[in-house]
Amino acid sequence: MEQIKRLLERRKEYLAQLIDDKEVALEGALQGSLRICKGKRRVQYYHRTNPKDFSGVYICEKDVCIAKDLAQKDYNRKVVSSAQKELKAIDRYLASCPKVQAEEIYEKLHEERRKIVNPIKKTERQYVEEWEKVKYSGKPFEEGIPEICTARGEKVRSKSEMIIADLLDRENIPYRYEYPIKIKGWGVFYPDFTALNIKKRKEIYWEHLGMMDDAAYAENALQKIALYEQNGILPNDNLILTYETKKNPINRKIIKLMIEQYLK
């Protein structure tokens, strides 16, 4: 509900600005109205300045700008009228909304009462707890590779992945490391991270491509991205992609920006 309210408030701002802009344009508009007659061969325009004179004065071709101005004025007036009605409708709706939404009632119940009530919608806490309880087996580690661990003691494959994991943890973003997903045309993928946007209750996959200056690695990465896309996992939607080369190492600011943009 809060998201709807925010959208409506942004809509109100847009409508108010639209009304202001069109009212300024109307202040200097040409007096009168436009009548249009469409014949077999051409369209004729007439300038009406007297309400009793239905016909109006014929607008010759060289003065067609008068017809355009009159048409624009009529359009602007209708836009203002429609926007004003919508603004009033939004205000009435927001004023009539209860202070406590139906989904919020559960959180306001006494703790003991919550234990014996089934809410109409899981709270964020309940949703996250169930999401984090999922058991899975990640991609096996090869023997002999350096041991790199995150701040919460989780083993990862690179220092860059450690940085991403620690930033996710610091920002309280639930995530799974190398959680297996099925990809048509390939089999099982192990995205570096499967993170959770709690507010949207949406899973976001994150791949860090850390050797993009290696031609074979880069080619394989492009193939992987293409397979993601073919399976409805799209960059800038439910797939975060970050890149790295020897000359351009991981950038913490970019990682934080990605977290803010897609996971909050």
Image (tube, rainbow, N blue to C red):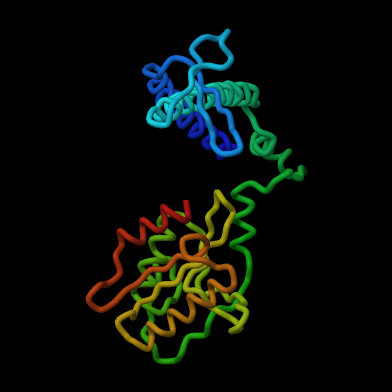
Is residue 126 visible in the rendered image? The answer is yes
Location of the N terminus (image quadrant): top right
Report the residue that reaches farthest toward the bottom: 143
Kindly identify the residue that appears in the image at 38 percent across and 61 percent down.
Answer: 167
Q: Quadrant of residue 67?
A: top left
216 or 34, which lies in front?
34
Residue 31: x %, y % from top left: 43, 15
Q: Between 65 and 18, which is closer to the camera in this rendering? A: 65
Where is residue 114? Give x, y as percent: 71, 41
On the image, the x and y values in percent for residue 212 come to 33, 79
Q: Nearer the viewer, residue 83 or 45?
A: 45
What is the x, y in percent for residue 151?
39, 66
Residue in the image at 46% along x and 29% along y? 13
**Above or below 28: residue 197:** below
Left or right: residue 5 versus residue 23 is right
Along the viewing direction, whichever of 198 and 149 lies nearer the viewer = 198
In this orientation, does residue 109 appear? Answer: no
